[in-house]
Amino acid sequence: MAAQRGKIIVIGAGHVGSAVLNALLGTNLAREIVLVNLDREQALGVALDAGHTLAFSYAAGCSIRVGDYEDCRDAQIIINTAGPSIKPGEKADRMALLETNLSVISSVMDGITRYTRDAILINVTNPVDVLTYYCYARYDYPRERLFSTGTLLDTARFHKMLADQLGIDAKCVTGFVLGEHGGTAFIPWNTVNIAGMPLDRFADQFGLKEPIDREQMTRAVKDSGLDIIELKGYTSSGVALAACQAVSAVLFDSHTVMPLSVIPDGEYGLRNVAMSLPCVLGEHGVERILTLPLDEDAERGMRACDEYLRSVLHDVDMKTGSVKKAGWLGGFPPQHTNPAASGPLPT
């Protein structure tokens, strides 16, 4: 069945799903939004609340309703937000959610693939990198139509933090956070620039008393989401707009370059893993993965991230969606070396 342009399925009606729905409405991106949620009454409440905003003058016409997985049959885009997130006081590592959210996403993917493998599928549920690869490996979802928001939000946080230090608009910063949406994320600093100006000229050009502390800023970017959780209880606004940026690139076929968690096919020498890399995104999904000229520091960051994510994936049973070894989740430090991480992963 042909996809209906502008038909978007949002799976999950919690904090993030509700924020995604509101962001889609606020940016006038959708013609039809269908909420799919285990608790249909909660979804109905979210849909009713959001639907009332359509009476205001800024809002474009959009149909909002509660549905089920059969609605995926002719959807153009599916955004999965289902599953619990880290709560205040819990272990500050998204990987600790893996065992629970493997079960959640297995149920979600069973529902989606019963009706389609043609829609663009955007995963927001953490840990996004491992779950994105799992969706590809177990459900044979086309790699170009499957990705997660990955480090798109981390990159936005990085742009804001760096811009604040320089006293400029965050949209003037060029540079990416890549790798895992988590502890092994890294910034290829040799590619960061302002209007083509490299990092080593920032202090002089912007009157800084000392150079940018790269290690401190990288830590701050990686910790900021967890800081928000401790202060607010959850994160929602940033990731919702990150998802909308990806949705916009698909709907308008804009060929936008952004960092998304994707499954590489030899780029940077990577295979059998999902992590955030700079991509060109358009109507048909991920058109290409761009290969940046990484310096030695960035190369080490990428290899450490690859090693870590592959070590996690080796403890996931791709046939059953279960974790082979209980008790370690969230316990690997970034420099961990797992002998199982060498060689190809099971598919």
Image (spheres, rainbow, N blue to C red):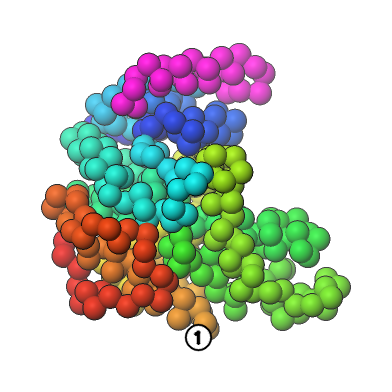
Whole-percent x and y of residue 204?
83, 78
Q: Which secondary structure lies at badge 1?
A: helix
Q: Is the magenta stretch mostly helix, strand or loop?
A: helix
Mark 1: amino acid: Glu
Q: Is residue 303 left or right of residue 158?
A: left
**Camera-nearest residue between 219 and 153:** 219
Q: Is residue 125 above or below residue 161?
A: above
Give the magenta range: 36-61
* Residue occupying the point 22% across, 65% down: 314
Tell whether 237 sits left or right of 161. left
Q: Which of 85 and 265 is in front in this view?
A: 85
Q: Is residue 39 magenta?
A: yes
Residue 260's quadrant in the figure? bottom left
Residue 207, image x and y in percent? 86, 73
- Magenta segment: does it hold 131? no
Q: Where is residue 7 in the image (x, y as percent from the top left)?
A: 40, 30
Along the viewing direction, whichever of 206 and 324 lies nearer the viewer: 324
> Circle 1 sits on which residue?
296
Q: How many labels does the image show?
A: 1
Does 247 appear above or below 336?
Answer: above
Q: Is residue 57 visible?
A: yes
Please tell me whether residue 107 is drawn above or below residue 207 in the rendered image. above
Q: Which residue is drawn at 58% across and 34% down?
A: 27
Residue located farthest toward the bottom when viewing the structure as drawn: 296
Residue 144, visible in the rendered structure = no
The residue that appears at 28% across and 75% down in the rendered structure is: 338
**Farthest residue in the left direction?**
319
